[in-house]
Image (spheres, rainbow, N blue to C red):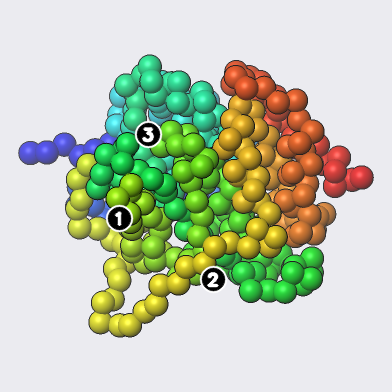
């Protein structure tokens, strides 16, 4: 009798986490959720615990957890509170794979702890590599931990790369939907409202990631992530607009062959691929309907409309502290936009201004990266108030 692969779902109540819970529930026992974590959406966390019966649930907001009535939590499920519980959970002997679905730099320490403990990390938190790519690369070279991409574009690249040798790769091409403003007149972008920016045409994501898609900052971060995840120079990374979001990325080989990974826009597929790798199994994700006609369109991105892309390439080339500063500045700028303190068209200029002003270091420590993370956020606040 086989033993199920034991999974810790970090950020179980978020967009990626909820998809991960569906994948585990539909795995016919091949996967078992042994740890579920949430910051504050505890009612949903309890529902998930009732469904999957993990060994542990972690509530990282200790104050909110102390005020919550946990009577619905199954009696054999241990409750751990506080952010330190994340580190305890990922190091547990009850965990084989960590699905890292906590958005933003908040998930960085838990990913590093999991890799140090020799776990396989299914990485949906792109900020880990964006902010600390050099540190993660160094850690992977010295620990038994493994990193598998969950981000749909990087999962697509990882899958397509299996068709050739590393030295045979000419370039990789990240696809982007173009977001809701791909065809808007440039002069109208300054008037974009929060509701308009949150109306993504193809993906159902959380607010931060949806705004990143609208500015295409998500693609800037993915460029940086691809640089570290696949050890590629910026010159071998490209971006194309693909409105249908069916081709999730492509790999071009030196003989001219291009291999694409295609599927409907459904995060459950890359999540399952990472959790069950190297095996492919029947799953719960949507399938293409080959009885219906459909079109696949591609176009190069308009760099004037999407200036964030240039920031991604700049940071991929520079390395060091640049990714951490860009990521933190963007998180703070997006939050300022959502709160009505910045115009939509001010998000990327604010990030560029802070990136150019920061004290660059080529080989920072984790502590220095965290210091600059806090500095960049404060600089956005100053930029907003100026």
- Residue 201 shows which numbered tag? 2
Would you place residue 99 above or below residue 189 in this image?
above
Q: CA distance from mark 3 to mark 2?
A: 30 Å
Pointer 3 with pointer 1, Cβ within 8 A: no
Which numbered disc, 2 or 1, marks the residue that appears first in the sequence? Answer: 2
Marks 3/2 in contact by CB < 8 Å: the verdict is: no
Mark 2 packing: few (<14 Cα in 10 Å), some, or many (20+)?
some
Q: Residues within 10 Å of mark 1 (few under 14, many from 20)?
A: few
Disc 2 or disc 1, which is closer to the eye? 1
Question: Horizontally, is 213 left or right of 238 in the view?
Answer: right
From the image, which quarter does the N terminus lie in?
top left
Vertical arrangement, residue 321 with respect to residue 252, above or below: above
The residue closer to the viewer here, 204 or 326, is: 326
Residue at point 24% right, 47% down?
163
| 119 over 35 or under it: above or below | above
Q: Can residue 73 be spotted in the picture? A: no
Q: Which residue is mark 1?
A: 257
Q: Earlier in the sequence, mark 3 or mark 1?
A: 3
**x, y (%) of residue 54?**
33, 40
Q: What is the secondary structure assignment of the residue under circle 1?
A: loop
Q: Give x and y (percent) for residue 198.
A: 63, 65
Q: Can you tell which quarter of the image residue 201 is in?
A: bottom right
Q: Secondary structure at mark 3?
A: strand
Please name whichever residue, 258 or 36, is drawn nearer the observer in this view of the structure. 258
Q: Earlier in the sequence, mark 3 or mark 2?
A: 3
Q: Which residue is mark 3?
A: 147
Give neighbour class at mark 3: few <14, some 14-19, many 20+ (Cα, 10 Å): many
| 357 w.r.t. 277: above or below | above
What is the number of the mark on residue 10?
none
User: Which residue is located at x 29 percent, y 32 percent?
Assistant: 96
Residues under labels 3 and 1: Cα distance?
27 Å
Which is nearer the eye, 96 or 251?
A: 251
């Amino acid at each position: 009798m086989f033993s199920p692969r034991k999974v810790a779902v970090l950020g179980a109540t978020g967009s990626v986490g909820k998809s991960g819970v569906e994948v585990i529930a539909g795995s016919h026992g091949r996967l078992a959720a042994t740890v579920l974590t949430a910051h504050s959406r505890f009612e949903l966390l309890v529902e998930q615990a009732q469904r999957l019966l993990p060994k542990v649930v972690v509530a990282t907001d200790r104050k909110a957890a102390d005020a919550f009535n946990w009577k619905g939590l199954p009696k054999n499920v241990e409750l751990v509170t506080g952010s330190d519980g994340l580190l305890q959970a990922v190091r547990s002997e009850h965990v084989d794979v960590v699905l890292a679905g906590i958005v933003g730099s908040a998930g960085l320490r838990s990913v590093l702890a999991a890799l140090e403990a020799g776990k396989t990390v299914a990485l949906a938190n792109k900020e880990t590599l964006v902010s600390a790519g050099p540190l993660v690369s160094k850690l992977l070279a010295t620990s038994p931990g493994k990193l598998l991409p969950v981000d749909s574009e990087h999962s697509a690249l990882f899958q397509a790369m299996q068709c050739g040798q590393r030295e045979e790769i000419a370039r990789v091409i990240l696809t982007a939907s173009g977001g809701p403003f791909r065809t808007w007149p440039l002069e109208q972008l300054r008037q974009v409202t929060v509701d308009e920016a949150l109306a993504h045409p193809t993906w159902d994501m959380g607010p931060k990631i949806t705004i990143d898609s609208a500015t295409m900052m998500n693609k800037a971060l993915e460029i940086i992530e691809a640089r570290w995840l696949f050890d590629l120079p910026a010159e071998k990374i490209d971006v194309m607009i693909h409105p249908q979001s069916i081709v999730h990325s492509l790999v071009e080989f030196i003989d001219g062959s291009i291999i694409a990974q295609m599927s409907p826009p459904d995060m459950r597929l890359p999540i399952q691929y990472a959790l069950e790798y190297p095996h492919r199994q029947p799953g719960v994700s949507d399938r293409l309907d080959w009885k219906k006609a459909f079109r696949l369109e591609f176009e190069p991105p308009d760099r004037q409309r999407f200036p964030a892309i240039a920031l991604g390439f700049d940071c991929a080339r520079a390395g060091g502290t640049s990714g951490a500063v860009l990521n933190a500045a963007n998180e703070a700028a997006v939050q300022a936009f959502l709160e009505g303190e910045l115009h939509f068209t001010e998000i990327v200029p604010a990030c560029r201004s802070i990136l150019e002003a920061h004290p660059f270091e080529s080989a920072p420590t984790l502590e220095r990266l965290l210091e600059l993370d806090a500095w960049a956020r404060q600089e956005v606040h100053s930029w907003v108030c100026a």
